[in-house]
Image (cartoon, rainbow, N blue to C red):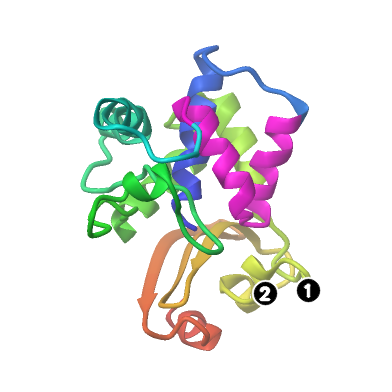
Amino acid sequence: SVVKLFYMAYAHQLIAEDRLKTSEELDRAMSDMIRDSNNDATGLILDTITNTTGGPELGKAALKTWMEKRQSVNRWLATVGITGVNCCQKTWNEGPYGRERQGYGPNFELRNSLTADACATMLLKIITDTIVTPQMCEKMRTLLKRDPKSQTDTQALNFTGSLLAVGDQLFSKAGWTSTVRHDVANIKRGDREIIFAIFTKHRPSDPKFLQFLS
């Protein structure tokens, strides 16, 4: 789910260029994607920013066009110096079907892939107003800001947020699946500040392991 950080950033790039119009529904999906890590909302955002939709299988020519559109995020990331990643797939509760499954390649070789370095770099750019525009960065920080003491925000409670003290500020995006648990976070305490990305594997149901690393 940390890939949602990149979809959010590209969406705000399109908004800043007036290539994407904001709406109440788009704002709702963006908020649900980042604040709650909602996969259905993520599907809408990815379809919107790449001008694609899911559906039945496609023929070879149509599939090629569809997959080229899905590469929009990757092409933009390369222009801002973030490479070695693949951000082109939706996030799922169950799994892809139809053209979405085709888009993964026969052996799922085109699945999303990220590095901790790329995630830390993207968050740093958002925190320091060095990607898109300062206005868009402020909007993204609003989405990423969390209450470290929240008992309902699982992305704070079950990740780094539970370690923080009253008065600390947290901007983060967590991710977890059946095999991994990740956290990408910016923490501010007084005049001290840190950004980190922690990726863990094989202990997804153990929040204390990631919190120990944090």
- 182 left or right of 44 in image: left
Dot 2 alpha-carbon crowd within 10 angstroms: few under 14, some 14 to 19, many 20 or more: some
Q: In the image, residue 119 lies at what x, y percent?
A: 38, 53
**Is residue 100 or residue 58 the one in the foreground?**
58
Residue in the image at 25% along x and 35% along y: 81
Query: What secondary structure is marked by label 2?
Result: helix
Q: In the image, residue 114 lies at what x, y percent?
A: 32, 55
CA gap between label 1 and label 2 equals 6 Å
Which quadrant of the view contains residue 88?
A: top left
Eyeballing the image, is 145 above or below 12?
Answer: below
Eyeballing the image, is 119 above or below 198?
Answer: above
Point out which mark residue 22 bears: none
Which quadrant of the view contains residue 62?
A: top left
Q: In the image, residue 51 lies at what x, y percent?
A: 47, 25
Q: In the image, residue 98 lies at what x, y percent?
A: 43, 46
Q: Amino acid at mark 1?
A: Gln
- 118 left or right of 95 in image: left
**Residue assigned mark 2:** 157
**Is residue 91 or residue 146 the one in the foreground?**
91
Range shown magenta: 25-52
Q: Is residue 126 magenta?
A: no
Residue in the image at 66% along x and 64% along y: 168
**Residue assigned mark 1:** 151
Dot 1 alpha-carbon crowd within 10 angstroms: few under 14, some 14 to 19, many 20 or more: few
Question: Could you tell me if residue 121 is visible in this image?
Answer: yes
Eyeballing the image, is 124 above or below 138?
Answer: below
